[in-house]
Amino acid sequence: MPSDAVLAAFSSDEEPITREDASQLARRLWSLLDKYHRKIYFALALIALWTACLLAGPALVKYGIDHGLTAKDATALYLSAGLYFCIAVAGFWFGRAAIWSVSKIGEPFLRDLRNKVFRHLISLDLGFFETEQTGRLVARLTSDVDAMQDLVQIGLAQFAQNVFLFVGAVVVILVLSWQLALCTLVVVPPVWWASRWFRRESSRAFLEVRDRIGHNLATLQEGLAGVRVVQAFGREPAFARRFRATNEAQYDANLETVRISTRYFPFIEYCGVGGTALIIGIGGWFTTINIVTVGTVAAFVLYLNNLFEPVQQLSQLYNTLQQAGAALKKLVLLLDTVPAIAEQPNARDLAPEGALEVEHVSFRYGKGPLVLHDVSVTVGLGERLALVGPTGAGKSTLAKLMCRFYDPVDGEVRYAGQSLADATLRSLRHRIVVVPQEGFLFAGTIRDNVRVGRPDASDHDVDDALHALGIRERFLALPEGLDTEVRERGSRLSAGERQLVSLARAALADPALLILDEATSNLDPGTEREVEHALEALTSGRSVVVVAHRLSTAARADRIGVVDDGRLQELGNHAELLRREGRYASLWASWTTAQTRAS
Amino acid sequence: MRSALNTQRGWLLGGVLAGGLWTGARLAGPLLAAAAIDQGILKQDGHAILVYSVAIALVGVVQAIGTALRRYTAFRIAYRVETDLRERLFAHLQRLHFAFHDQAQTGQLMARANSDIQQVNLVVVLLPLTIATTFLLAGVIIVMVSQSVVLAVFALGALPLLSLAAARFSHRLHPISLELQNELGDYSGVVEESVAGIRVVKGFGTEARQEDQLAVESSQVMDRALAAARLRANFLPLVDFLPALALVIILGYGGHLVLEGKLQIGDLVAFNAYILYLLWPLRLVGMLVAQAARSSAAAGRIDELLATDTAVTDPAHPAALPSGGGEVRFEDVRFGYGSGPPVLAGFDLVMRPGEAVALVGPTASGKTTVARLLPRFYDATDGRVVLDGVDIRKLALRDLRRAIGIVFEDTFLFTDSVAENIAFAEPDASMDTVRNAARLAGAAEFIDALPEGYDTLIGEHGYSLSGGQRQRIAIARAVLADPRVLILDDATSSVDPTKEHEIRAALREVMRDRTTLIIAHRAATIALADRVVLLDGGRVVADGPHEELLATSERYRTVLAQAQPAPVAGASD
């Protein structure tokens, strides 16, 4: 059976928003819509006109019947029919204009919202990304904006139109005959009540359907992914049974929704017919005592529709509003998150070259315990420093402070004498570049991916960067050379090749200080050697900090820093540290024996 | 597809009958209203008014019952058809041969079983309503024509345009919706990779590049959404306009007839009601027409899948598998995938009962293919494979596969408990059998240490195990049924080299007294075998103990050297 992880993916984590939330969110939405206010008033006016045209129809029918037919006046009849025609045409045009003008507000607004949320998201510090799940962040920009889209595309216009229609119809029938109107309005509460019941029950049932579909798809997917194992062990019938169970469960859930709607829709339909019977019965009796005319009765029968539809629609729209509100709440929360790493107002560019000094730095993630205690170390110009130590000891964290992915809680990191916190982010990212462990590739060609290192680089620069690392030929040898799409099926690059692209990026960026996070996993044997050569070429002539997972890498550095328990325990070159017979020496001893045993 | 509907014939008939009931009540309502106006209100007859309005209310009850039955049957049929079809599809997919699954994409098969079936469902749901609407339309035409042919023609004339417009709208909206979906896919692609690659983005400070890309995508999304909005803006007001046109005609021309004394005022009101009644159904019919095209395409895709026959089938009269020690012979076996080049070109191999043979060869030399022919995942194009003296094509698939235990290169575990995964071949196996298999596979120790022991949920969505642990569970699964032949297809490749020796110990245990075919790259795994067979160009090029081949075969040495992972110490040392 699929576990909670699957269920979580299919069930919502939304909680209903409160009344205070709603009014706060409405104000926030209104301010987000800032530059559209004038257009919104215009669109509302169009919707009102459209609605007025719809409401005028039955009134004209009444006029035609009373003044034309009952009074035997042909002119009045043709006048009312002619007017009705004109109003219908006008309604058509107003409707078109209204829908179009709402879209012309909504779609650009959604585009701006997408851009705005994305721009904000991407400006947030790395710490934020490390505490949030990728899936959740992506959902902000996909499903949450989509929920807003439902609201903006159809929801708001429909909401406005239905409110206008309902209020308009009530006003018109009250004017025509308040006595008959009061009798007619009796049917509204049951329709409202039933619609609310339906909304509640059906959303519960549809959630269940969604869960069951999730279960069923998970079984299906597993059956397909494991089909070879199933066949190898001759278990096809058992799996068919297993699928039948989840499949029937989905059917049962679907049928439950049918049962709910089978109760609701006939009831609504009956309210319509019952309302007609009521209008004709009571209205007819009113005609006998001269309270209303025949035309009024006919108009009421036609207006009944204009009372029902909005009530039903509005109760449905309530769901859309709820969902959009919940989505907006999450979006607002994201937009209100302040990036922890931002440029100071008086930031200055970093000097082109210099030493990196870490001085008495301490650090903790969020409110957690200190993971670095009072660490000081200097990386001289052109020096290569390796950081070693057990997993979780703090060596990667130290590396992240060196490029200001985080700010220290205490102490300072300086480059060429200037604090990183006072530097422009642009110059900082230009002087100090981090090459992550895994070579991450974006959709696009190899060339595009290298160019990430410096977006304004020419093709020639990209070639040069690859050439400098001695890897240009290997990529040119691909059928489509540097124009190979990296995400396309069949042209997937190996882990080693991805790492090469990642190094070429760094070469193109041409930083003064490189921070390397060494890969923990083995690369494919073919590219391992090339990666080593490329690294050699990339690091020569630059200051380098490498977070080393292999002691062979550390041994080649100018100096080695042993980080453990959040402190810099030892610092010196390979020979010095071995002589010291401290932590590094014992790490080295146990590692070399493991190596000889393995080979 | 048709057969799926056939099983629902009874319900379908019931749905149509309910539709008839509904139609009758719907037609009667406005006629009663007309009578109430003409006989009651205009004649100031209070009694008639009361009678007719009560009659309207009663007919309303019938109409509501009709609606309830019609809706319920329609949806029930549709969901039943959908559910049955999906079950058939799944059972069929489970039986289809490996070669089919090699080239099919899981995502596409999922789409067949999910969205394609739902497309079919949509038409099935609308079917009874369409039939009922046809009845209703016919009834309205009859009623109106009986009053005035000219009025009926003018008033109803505009309404088919509504179906037409709805069909056109749906037809034109569909490609735009698909484009919009694609654009949204591209857009979320940029979001996803920006978040996933945030370290690169931050590391190089290239936020602006990502923002530019996103701005392009979000603009394209907007363009498509606006194109859809333009269609909606043209269609939706039409839904109000066309019936209003009919109402205008009824008022103007109908009123004219009333003044001439050829029609009653009540009839006018009744006609108005009919027009409003027909509104929704006619729109739906238009949608149905557009949907039908998509659904039939979906149904075509499903049918195509169901019509794919499985290539590997049981013989008509299966032979019994004689008891034996698991002697395996490949006799001049030839095989190629589909119309591709031959992978095996005259492959000969004899494995004596209980013998362990390692199959070694360069990439794409056909090693895995050999392993796949033995359980008949594929059939050889020429030559034969013999198990204990019987051609495997003469055996029942079930018997053959029971006699062979296989450990795949990628250990697929199901989302189930550890015990159920191990007892996969025999779900009724006793707990002792399961424990024994786990012990043989060297898995007993770590399983006991799991939070819930053998009841721990594992697999894709369960407790995550290390590669070595997964591998050992797969080994336990393979040996539970006590197969006479064991196939280890690169079973140690995904295991951390430092943990490999643990697996090797387990393998040595389970290989005892079984004929074993080992496909391996690493020297340490090859060492488990009694004999090594070097495969190249689809045939055996060398055969003998590991040391002997190492000494005599240059080819063997190169193949081994290529396959060895670089030492962890780093290549440049």
Image (cartoon, coloured by chain):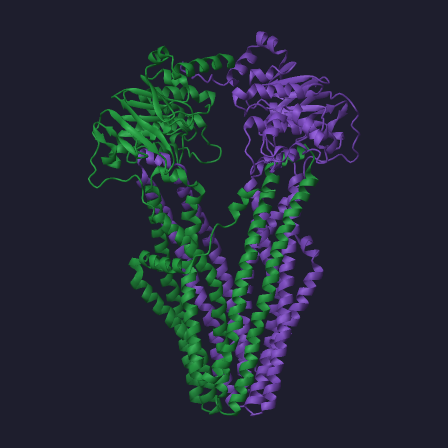
Chain colours: A green, B purple
Q: Vertical placement of B255 versus B372: above or below?
A: below
- Can the viewer see residue A69? yes
Which of the 4 quarters of the picture holds residue A55?
bottom left
Tell me which residue sits at (64%, 44%) in the image.
Answer: B90
Q: Nearer the viewer, residue A517 or A479?
A: A517
Residue A187: x and y in percent read 52, 75
Residue B128: x and y in percent read 63, 64
Q: Vertical placement of B118 versus A355: above or below?
A: below
Tell me which residue sits at (70%, 32%) in the image.
Answer: B431
Q: Nearer the viewer, residue B355 or A16?
A: A16
Residue A212: x and y in percent read 59, 50
Tell me which residue sits at (61%, 82%) in the image.
Answer: B54
Q: Residue furthest top?
A: B551
- Can the viewer see residue B150? no
Residue A30: x and y in percent read 33, 59
Q: Count all numbered tags in the image, as a single digit.
A: 0
